[in-house]
Image (cartoon, grey):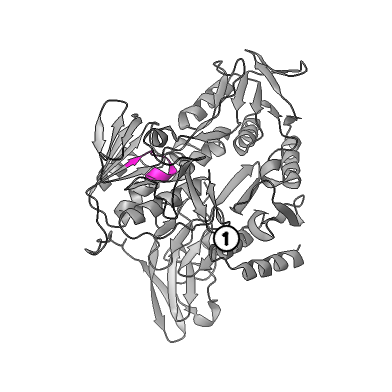
Amino acid sequence: MGQAPELTGPDMSAGIEISRIPENIPLLGHANGAAVILVRKGSTFHALGATCSHYSGPLAEGLVVGETVRCPWHHACFDLRTGEALGGPALDPIPCYEVTRRDDRVSVGAKKPQAPLPTLPQSSAKIATKIVIAGAGAAGAAAAEKLRRLGYVGAITLIGNEMPGPVDRPNLSKDFLAGKAPMEWVTLRDDAFYEKLGIEFIKADKVIGLDPKGKSIKLESGRTVPYDKLLLATGSEPVRLPIDGATLPHVKTLRTLADAQAIIAASANSRRVVVIGSSFIGLEVAASLRARNLEVDVVSRDSVPLGNILGAQVGGFVQKLHEEKGVRFHLGARLRAIHADAVELEGGVRLAADVVVLGVGVKPRTELAQRAGLTVDNGVVVDSQLRTSAPDVWAAGDIARYPESRLGTHVRIEHWAAAERQGQSVAADMLGLGRPFNDVPFFWSAHYDVTLSYVGHAGGDAETEVLGSLEKRDAAVVYRVGGNVAAVLTVGRDQQSLEIEAALESKDWGGIDALLREFASGS
């Protein structure tokens, strides 16, 4: 997950001249044995822990936006004043430190005690006495925590049918599958965490019915759970191809921790694996299994991996990364059948396979909402505050199709960080503290030692421009829709990714153009 930074830079406990502290730029130093960043905003100074609470990203290399600091690795967002984690993928706050100013020097002192949870003002909304969350993935788990961190003291029931509970799902296809991440990196929260917060966590039970008029849900076990307010966060499930052999025991999908563990177990005594599909999941699985020294073939109907999402140039770059590691691609291919020891393509080509992994996408679990009469159209349709067509019912995560204000259309985003932030946004809205959900979509995808960072949202028909050099692993790829910048993918340019995210967030189109001119001049 990353290491804490070495103690470098000035000793801030001894004091530092104000003239050495730049405005709105994190300054890395240390105080009393801890790595610290010092941020100056006018005459105010903030001292915080130097590492992100998500994967220990270096916040000194991040970006200050308003009263927040953003992590350069995965764009987690923290409050400069309190250290509170305001936006996923980070869930835990970072420490804050006392700051003392004497004349022209500032010194950093002891760590501040963690701030107590707030108390909701009496004027804040019709606060529910029972909130139910259906789904314990990224959106559901983040919402449950946020409710408590916002001061809600009523009953919360979190329902998840995947054991052992919330996990760091992006890690399942990356370091965990590659054998580089221990289990403690994957499990997010344990039972004791929810007990401490007073959250009832129902595990290994599935929501099978929703009665919006009676305000209750029914579980597979037969239990009925009433609610005042409900969040649907049922997520997605992997697509299984309707071909012969797709349900054979050695054919795997990857969505849950159990899925990842099954692939690891199957790979232990295997030599060759065939990955079907050149999706992000499929390609990350290919990279992880190459790290385990398996021979890997990727079969895809696409002419270029990821070409329909990222464009042919980026797709070709990613393909080359994999080929350099020994992955063999079979593109523009159609499957005929999966056999016990091989995958058969149309035309009679057979690829030996001890393990087959399906990476052909996911589909949102919308059946529950549809049966209950909610508006469903390529996802559960919600408004700008993620409210469904049923009173007191919200939807977040993979199932939510919401209005994207920058594009002027509804979108459904299947990204981990976006799901967490939607869950956090719903928690605030349930308590009368909400606002329209306007966070910029962000995801990252790891391929060996190369990470793709993507901010914004653009379709496959977007105009594409590459600034810099993909081959040198130093590039920004701009995606325009209708002439406007809709998304930017970066390789080796974490700071630029954060700058574009901030500009998209504020719809600063002139600022985006200026940033792109700056990127181009340095290409």
**Residue 306 image position (x, y, % from top left):** 68, 40
- Camera-side residue: 276 or 493? 276
Residue 193 pos. (x, y %): 31, 44
**Quadrant of the image occupied by residue 407:** bottom right
Type of the residue with mark 1: Glu
> Residue placed at 23% from the left, 52% from the top?
153
Q: Residues within 10 Å of mark 1 (few under 14, many from 20)?
A: many
- Between residues 103 and 234, which one lies in front from this camera angle? 234
Whether residue 204 is situated above or below residue 132 in the rendered picture: above
Q: Position of residue 68 (x, y in %)?
A: 46, 66
Q: Residue at x 53, y 76 (%)?
A: 23
Q: Is residue 437 above or below residue 276?
A: below
Q: Tell me which corner region of the image, top left, top right, bottom left or bottom right, holds residue 395.
A: top left
The image shows residue 130 at horizontal and vertical percentages of 24, 46
Outermost top residue: 340
Residue 300 or residue 125, whichever sits in front: 125
Query: Residue drawn at (57%, 65%), measured in percent from left and top?
Result: 507
Q: Using residue 323 as the reference point, say whether residue 198 is left or right of it.
A: left
Residue 282 in the magenta stretch? The answer is: no
Secondary structure at badge 1 equals helix
**Residue 140 left/right relative to 243:** left
Classify 328 as above or below 148.
above
Report the quarter where the C terminus lies. Answer: bottom right
> What's the magenta region?
133-141
* Residue 307 in view (yes/no): yes
Residue under label 1: 501
Residue drawn 38% across and 36% down?
165
**Towards the viewer: 145 or 506:** 506
* Numbered label tally: 1
Picture quadrant where residue 328 is located: top right
Q: Is residue 435 left or right of residue 308?
A: left
- Can residue 92 be seen by looking at this rendering? no
